Image (cartoon, rainbow, N blue to C red):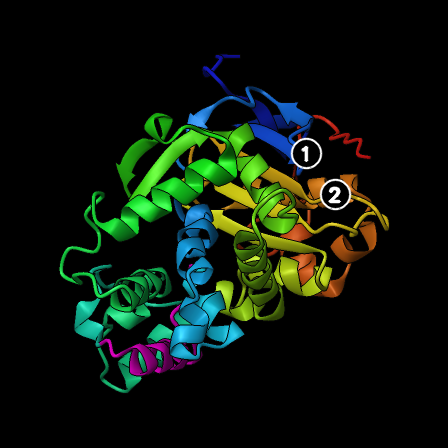
Amino acid sequence: MKKIKGYAPLVQVTRGRIVESLHFGALAIVDSAGTLLASLADPKLVTFPRSSMKPFQVLPFVERGGLEKFNLTEEELAIMCASHAGTDRHVEVLKSIHNKVGLHEGNLQCGTHWPEKDTAEAMKLRGEEPTPFRHNCSGKHTGMLAAAKMRDLSLNDYLDPEHPIQRSIRKAMAEMSGTPAKELILGIDGCSAPVYALQICNFASAVARLCDPDNFGSEREEACHKITDAMIHYPFMIAGPHRLDTALMEVMQGKVISKGGAEGFQMIGIMPGALHSRSRGIGIVFKIADGDPNRRATHCLTTALMKAFGFEKEMASEAFSEFSSPVLKNWRGLDVGTIRPVRKIKVRWN
């Protein structure tokens, strides 16, 4: 078996009696005290969180009082953390933010793509072409523009890594993850916004602290609570129909936040008190080496991890069955194999 530096086999796909395919990956689970609870492969693997970084990218805006400045709702905050499906409801919420802030769609520099299938088909019947509002990152970009508007900063270059908005995001990511800002590796995301690579154990620590923001000042603690509350209360805004993040937060009913990223990245935050009355917040982060294009390894690992934390009932629910089934089916719907973790995942927590 060929090794990939930093990664180990995490998910196997069987057909008949043999293992046909393997997904390599790396996993880190950290609590809000910074304790590494479990890992697979290299927990210090450096990679880009991609869209899993979105709740942190909106943090400086919330911390500075942006919601109150523009009278924004929890639902509107949620879409700023989102990789949304571009449904009509998502567009309605985005338009509301733009109206309140004084923005227009032309300010968005995220690009354009078609939304999820059902919405795209309805748009084609109406003779409607996609616009930047349909882009899955338009909520994040709207948050960045709102932050610039609030501070009377330029809008045309809001994606420049040295723009004050991007510098504030870099600073917040460094503080939340315990990573020196100079060690964050700059990249440009698919939507043209800056994104930073860091160790997955440090990103998991940031997720745990987002869920359980002890030892921060009151402004940051309050901002973290607002972000996690918005994600939990409006899971549809975070993704949409037939999307893992939305389904997981719906079935977990306030116990977790979830935000996936491109190229096989996933973060899950377990809220404090979800495991027992005094349990800490926990950050779960994993990266699938091959990018997991159809998300099957992500679905499999997410289900296994939630079961390892004692959430078997939620994972067995009908509402989550689309993501938790270990059965590999062919185009006729016949069972032809399985998708399952290479090894059983065990986690101990305080």
Point out the residue furthest to the bottom here. Answer: 126
Q: Dot 2: what SS?
A: loop
Which one is in front, 206 or 250?
206
Tell me the residue at 83%/46% (across/down): 278
Tell me the residue at 71%/26% (across/down): 343
Q: Which mark is residue 103?
A: none
Q: Is residue 93 magenta?
A: yes
**Gap in angstroms between the C-alphas marked 1 and 2:** 8 Å
Residue 228 appears in which quarter of the rendering?
bottom right
Tell me the residue at 43%/52% (across/down): 54
The part of the chain drawn in magenta is 83-103
Question: Residue 166 location in percent, x, y?
Answer: 28, 48
- Residue 173 falls left or right of residue 193: right
Point out the residue furthest to the top here. Answer: 2
Q: Which residue is mark 1?
A: 33
Kindly check if marks 1 and 2 are in contact, taking CB atoms under 8 A apart as contact.
yes
Q: Amino acid at mark 2?
A: Arg
Tell me the residue at 31%/67% (across/down): 146
Q: Which residue is mark 2?
A: 280
Which one is in front, 273 or 268?
273
Q: Amino acid at mark 1?
A: Ala
